[in-house]
Amino acid sequence: MTGIAVLGSTNMDLVAYVARAPERGETVTGREFRTIPGGKGANQAVAAARAGGDVVMIGAVGADVYGDLLRANLSGSGVDTEFLHTVDGPSGTAHIVVDDAGSNAIVVIPGANGTVTALGPGEITAIASADLLLLQLELPLPAVLEGARAAHVHGVRTILTPSPVQPLPEELLDCVDLLIPNEHEAAALSGSADPYAAAELLLRQVPEVVITLGAKGSLYAARGGGPVLFPAPEVTAVDTTGAGDTFVGTLAVALGEGRPVPEALVWASSAAALCVQRPGASTSMPYRSEIDAS
Ligand code: ADP
């Protein structure tokens, strides 16, 4: 089984569905409210575990009711939460207003995620003994850097999802083996809106890049070769939340199993296509048997 360590965020998404979002100072009555487990770290952990990985989640939740629910959601999908610490104060939350046009406005409060500024010996050992480390940018950067360094020193392959996008320190990029931005993140990081050009530019900083292109699929590039497009299966999307995280978590499992990159990308694309055909984020992530059957 592929050992995967995820160092990342765990949030409860608090989603209000309204016909029209309120203006400043206005109150509107909404239609529906849902609490949905999220956070890019936790989502990638669930995706990888459902795809057949042996996954350990490193991060923090708060000492509140959301913390218990977030932990239960991860362990329900088979994720090891030994290094998901419970800290004083609230869990991370994302306050989301979705209107009938499908537009959303989001306030993220890091809560417990913001307390993860350094790693202990247990976390370092968990990373060192994994096959792959999955990183995103929803935890404080010092912790992300420390995790990346630990993986690098121990020869653990590191995949970074640069979200929320921000300038990346060279020290971090030096430890990244595979960078997986979406189209917008790739443009912001490279300065080029053309994904093919962006892939070439990003290869100056990391050895391998996958740029996800939504319904268009994904673009893979490694040093020494031109970018190759892997089209996504044509499906009817009902909710694309979590598609990117499903793609990354599943890809990590396939790569850890030593499957060739093209085969791994096709498998990850199948998993993400299954995810977009169902509502929700972590709840819509497919299990290995479903990916294999699709
Ligand atoms: P993010 O959700 O992080 O912005 P993308 O929108 O690029 O990332 O989606 C990630 C991956 O999910 C894509 O590369 C693709 O494989 C899959 N995907 C996303 N939207 C669709 C869609 N409408 N149909 C099929 N696959 C999709």
Image (cartoon, helix red, strand yellow):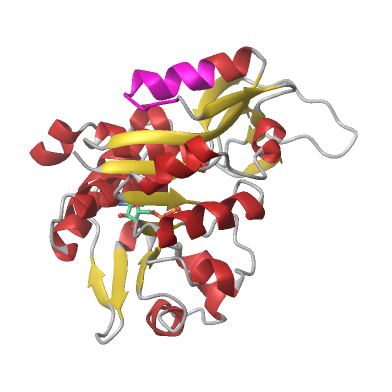
- Is residue 38 visible in the rendered structure shown here? yes
Residue 276 covered by magenta stretch: no
Q: Nearer the viewer, residue 20 or 84?
A: 84
Along the horizontal axis of the image, is 218 left or right of 10? left
Residue range (magenta): 69-81
SS assignment for the magenta stretch, majority: helix
Q: Position of residue 69 (x, y in %)?
A: 52, 16
Q: How many marks?
A: 0
- Give coordinates of residue 66: x percent, y percent: 60, 18
Along the viewing direction, whichever of 118 and 91 lies nearer the viewer: 118
Q: Could you say where residue 8 lies in the image, as x and y percent from the top left?
A: 52, 42
Q: Which residue sits at x=24%, y=51%?
A: 268
Q: Residue furthest right?
A: 25
- Quadrant containing the N terminus is top left
Of residues 97 and 147, the one drawn nearer to the viewer in this rendering: 147
In the displayed structure image, the side of residue 34 where residue 72 appears, left or right: left
Q: Residue furthest left?
A: 293
Q: Residue at x 64, y 37 (%)?
A: 113
Residue 182, horizontal then vertical, whole percent: 45, 62
As drawn, 89 above or below 180: above
Q: Is residue 76 magenta?
A: yes
In front here: 83 or 13? Answer: 83
Residue located at (48% from left, 44% from top): 124
The quadrant the C terminus occupies is top left
Residue 233 visible (yes or no): no
Vertical position of residue 207 compared to residue 144: above or below: below
Displayed quadrant of residue 209: bottom left
